[in-house]
Each structure stands twice: as structure tokens, then as C-alpha cells.
Image (tube, rainbow, N blue to C red):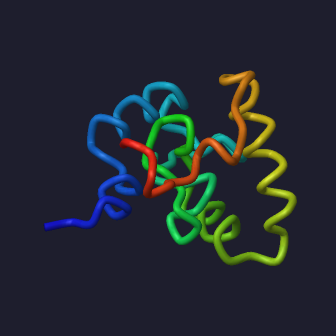
Amino acid sequence: MKHRRTKATDITSSVRKVVALRDNGLCIVCGRQGISNAHIVPRSAGGLGIEQNIVTLCPDHHHEYDNGKNKDYYKEKIYTYIQSLYPNWQEENMIFRKWEKI
């Protein structure tokens, strides 16, 4: 049985499909073919697996966002993009809190 946090941070196939359609299957940084599995707020920080916290990135930019030296650059691009789609988007609302219902 999965823990509540694991379930909340997982990206379901339905969320992947919605994000892929929203982003046209393309990396939101460079426009190349991408995968809709990049958490904006990372899973390690409790980032929820919901469409407002997932974007499509190519493998190179996903790696750079997660591990690169220019993380702030990618974070700014991703936050600007997601806030253009969801004007009320706030990072703190993308984090799992065990006392809240999923």
C-alpha cells in the first residue's frame, strides 16, 4: 500500500495526458519533443502530481532543471509559463501537507 504522500506526488496517466495536450507534447523551454513528467515543485519537497505542478520538458532540460548549474534560469522560465496558464498559481499550493485531504 502506498503512503498518502507517495500517492499525492505521483503523476497519474490522466494528469500526464492533460499536461501533454496543454503543452502540445513539446518542451516548454526549447520546443523539442518532451515528456510530461517534470514536477515544478519537486517530489522531494512534497510537490503534488497535479497538472498545475507538472510541465513538459525534453530530457536535457528536465535534467538541467533538476540537477544543473542554471536551475534558477529554468525555474524562472517554468514559473513564468505556468503562471501564464494559471494566474493564481502559487508554489506553496503545490506542496503535499499531510493534514489536508488529497
Looking at the picture, how far across and down is residue 86, in whole percent? 67, 24
Image quadrant holding the N terminus, namely bottom left
The quarter holding residue 17 reads: top left
- Please tell me which residue is depicted at 74% across the width and 34% down the height of the picture: 81
Which residue is nearer to you in this view: 57 or 95?
Answer: 95
- Please tell me which residue is depicted at 85% across the width and 62% down the height of the picture: 72
How many numbered marks, from 0 up? 0
Q: Is residue 4 above or below residue 53?
A: below
Q: Horizontally, is 10 left or right of 86 in the view?
A: left
Residue sticking out furthest to the front: 99
Looking at the picture, how far across and down is residue 5, in whole percent? 38, 62
Residue sticking out furthest to the left: 1
The quarter holding residue 83 reads: top right
Looking at the picture, how far across and down is residue 28, in whole percent? 66, 41
Looking at the picture, how far across and down is residue 9, in whole percent? 41, 56
- Please tell me which residue is depicted at 51% across the width and 45% down the height of the picture: 33
Q: Is residue 44 above or below residue 58?
A: below
Which residue is nearer to you in this view: 81 or 27?
Answer: 81
Q: Is residue 100 above or below residue 97?
A: above
Image quadrant holding the C terminus, namely top left
Q: Horizontally, is 25 left or right of 13 in the view?
A: right
Q: Horizontally, is 3 left or right of 43 in the view?
A: left
